[in-house]
């Protein structure tokens, strides 16, 4: 493998970004796999996220056996497992980050234009075959949707591995609520520490051991002047306005071959939007795989790298390898003890053998199979533990796989309310089932969120199994008045043996096990509007229910 380090990548406005280019040692022109983002092309995974690195080293010897891991950078492909198979791997530091000077403006139209220019540069270099593919996790997956919608001529295929396309609903304002826990932590730890010119960065260059943020040293005042105030911008836009629309791609413009991989372990950030991205793109050649476990690890496992390579061999090398026969949709179903129950192979999502099943809420605490005749209600303190509705022990084995939702009839003592819905499961002894996620080792079955003042539905995009909120206006509620609201619960999968129970918990604040994905910024959730008493109403006239995707 040959490494060209800190290569100049010209932008249309005259700026220069920096990239590392890993090439096969033999002469020739090769297809390119490109990544573009702010985390640092020269920051080793062990520096960027030590816990995930420790997990890889301690629990997955198969990953370490396939590579020295010397060049392993967070959320990007390992060049050592690609260059021997005739690929060039290009990693570009986005503007204002790492070794690339300029104004730091992440998740913006300006960054997407730079991404486009980097693809076109890579597609015309002497070592390039002219075909560029995109491969990466999270940030390095999410940006793929936006640049692919811009249709750069040399982009030939995309492989977003657990990365949502929806900048509003999933990454910053989860169904209207500011995702403060993740956004603030991510901005401070993952982005600002690697801003170009930051002398206080803890990140060091993999090869040189020098400061990773370029040759310049900028003062705190210069650093602030050289970046957009990401947090302030998000807080200044509480609805899905023009600022957000510029940051959410038109999926219908994406017609490239696409292998989309989602992961149940992405609850709280990428899971829903990754699957929705697959559904929304116009590509005739597209595949969806939904896996279990930690997506940081699954991305690097040799069998998954081999799958990635088969896809790119077909669409970047034009090899007739039978990839078109790959099932259109593959879904792993989880089981108690975080085990894998089975893998469902299908042609579409949601799965065609889904039996949409309603479990009705019967206040104060029951989940029942038929609409309760008598009206009832239960109230809870918005900032308290909430209320849980539980089913009777299942009289048979059940399997669920797909999207879920709940329709509630609610009222509040205040002019707004945040609803946090958590889908849970318990064994016959009452022990809760939990699962490994990317940010939490004991995650519930699934979750959903909604700011009630943003309950307005988009009738064009909503379905019987997925409410789609416009988020384009704020409709305050009248204290004491009852309103119907639909909450999307993120897609999930679960096999439950006979005797297990399902439950759903509703709160006005975060469930206790959400890792980084909290929603507690006081400026977004003033007590006068969100710290009152909330009420859920049930009965024949107000049939609050939980809709689940049972598999026949």
Image (spheres, rainbow, N blue to C red):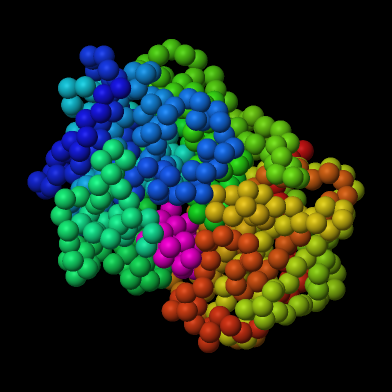
Percent coordinates x, y for residue 74 in the rendering:
41, 43
> Does the segment drawn in magenta span residue 172?
yes
Residue that appears at 9% across and 46% down? 14
Percent coordinates x, y for residue 520 in the rendering:
51, 73
Q: Quadrant of the C terminus?
A: top right
Where is residue 151, by image quadrant? top left
Q: Which residues are magenta?
A: 165-187
Where is residue 320, by image quadrant? top left
Percent coordinates x, y for residue 275 in the rendering:
52, 44
Task: Establish if 231 lies above or below 111.
Answer: below
Residue that appears at 26% across and 14% down? 26
Residue that appears at 32% across and 40% down? 206
Looking at this rendering, what residue extends furthest in the front direction?
209
Q: Is residue 456 visible?
A: no
Percent coordinates x, y for residue 251 in the rendering:
40, 44
Residue that appears at 24% across and 59% down? 198
> Does the segment drawn in magenta span residue 302?
no
Main secondary structure found in the magenta portion = helix
Q: Is residue 13 visible?
A: yes
Task: Establish if 102 lies above or below 311.
Answer: below
Q: Quadrant of the N terminus?
A: top left
Relative placement, left or right, of 499 versus 380 is right
Tell me how many marks there are.
0
């Amino acid at each position: 493998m040959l490494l060209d380090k800190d290569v100049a990548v010209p932008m249309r406005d005259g700026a220069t970004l920096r990239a590392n280019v890993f090439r096969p040692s033999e002469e020739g022109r090769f297809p390119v796999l490109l990544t573009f983002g702010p985390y640092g092309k020269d920051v080793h995974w062990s520096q960027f996220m030590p816990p995930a690195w420790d997990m890889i080293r301690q629990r997955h010897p198969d990953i370490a056996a396939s590579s020295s891991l010397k060049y392993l950078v967070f959320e990007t492909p390992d060049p050592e497992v690609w260059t021997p198979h005739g690929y060039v791997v290009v990693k570009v530091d986005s503007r204002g980050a790492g070794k690339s000077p300029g104004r730091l403006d992440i998740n913006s139209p300006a960054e997407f234009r730079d991404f486009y220019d980097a693809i076109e540069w890579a597609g015309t270099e002497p070592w390039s075959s002219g075909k560029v593919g995109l491969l990466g996790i999270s940030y390095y997956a999410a940006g793929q949707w936006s640049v692919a919608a811009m249709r750069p001529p040399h982009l030939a295929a995309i492989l977003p591995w657990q990365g949502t396309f929806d900048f509003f609903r999933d990454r910053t304002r989860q169904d209207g609520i500011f995702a403060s826990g993740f956004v603030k932590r991510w901005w401070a730890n993952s982005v600002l520490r690697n801003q170009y010119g930051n002398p206080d960065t803890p990140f060091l260059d993999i090869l040189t051991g020098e400061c990773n943020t370029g040759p310049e040293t900028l003062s705190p005042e210069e650093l602030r002047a050289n970046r957009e105030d990401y947090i302030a911008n998000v807080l200044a836009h509480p609805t899905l306005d023009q600022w957000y629309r510029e940051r959410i791609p038109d999926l219908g413009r994406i017609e490239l071959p696409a292998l989309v991989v989602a992961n149940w372990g992405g609850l709280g950030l990428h899971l829903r939007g990754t699957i929705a991205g697959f559904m929304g793109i116009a590509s005739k050649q597209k595949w969806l795989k939904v896996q279990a476990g930690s997506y940081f690890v699954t991305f690097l496992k040799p069998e998954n790298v081999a799958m990635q390579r088969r896809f790119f061999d077909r669409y970047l090398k034009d090899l007739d390898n039978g990839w078109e026969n790959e099932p259109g949709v593959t879904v792993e179903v989880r089981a108690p003890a975080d085990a894998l129950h089975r893998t469902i192979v299908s042609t579409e999502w949601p799965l065609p053998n889904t039996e949409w099943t309603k479990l009705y809420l019967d206040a104060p605490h029951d989940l029942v199979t038929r609409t309760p005749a008598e009206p009832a209600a239960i109230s809870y303190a918005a900032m308290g533990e909430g209320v849980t509705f539980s089913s009777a022990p299942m009289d048979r084995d059940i399997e669920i796989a797909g999207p879920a939702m709940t329709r509630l009839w609610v009222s509040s003592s205040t002019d707004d309310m945040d609803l946090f819905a958590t889908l849970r499961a318990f064994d016959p002894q009452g022990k809760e089932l939990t699962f490994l996620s990317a940010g939490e080792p004991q995650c519930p079955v699934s979750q959903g969120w909604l700011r009630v003042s943003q309950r307005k539905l988009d009738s064009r995009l909503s379905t019987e199994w997925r409410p789609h909120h416009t988020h384009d206006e704020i409709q305050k509620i009248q204290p004491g008045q009852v309103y119907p609201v639909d909450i999307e619960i993120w897609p999930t999968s679960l096999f439950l043996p006979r005797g297990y129970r399902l439950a759903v918990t509703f709160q006005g604040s975060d469930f206790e096990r959400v890792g980084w994905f909290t929603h507690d910024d006081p400026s977004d959730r003033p007590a006068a509007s969100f710290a009152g008493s909330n009420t859920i109403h049930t009965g024949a006239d107000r049939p609050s229910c939980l809709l689940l995707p049972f598999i026949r």
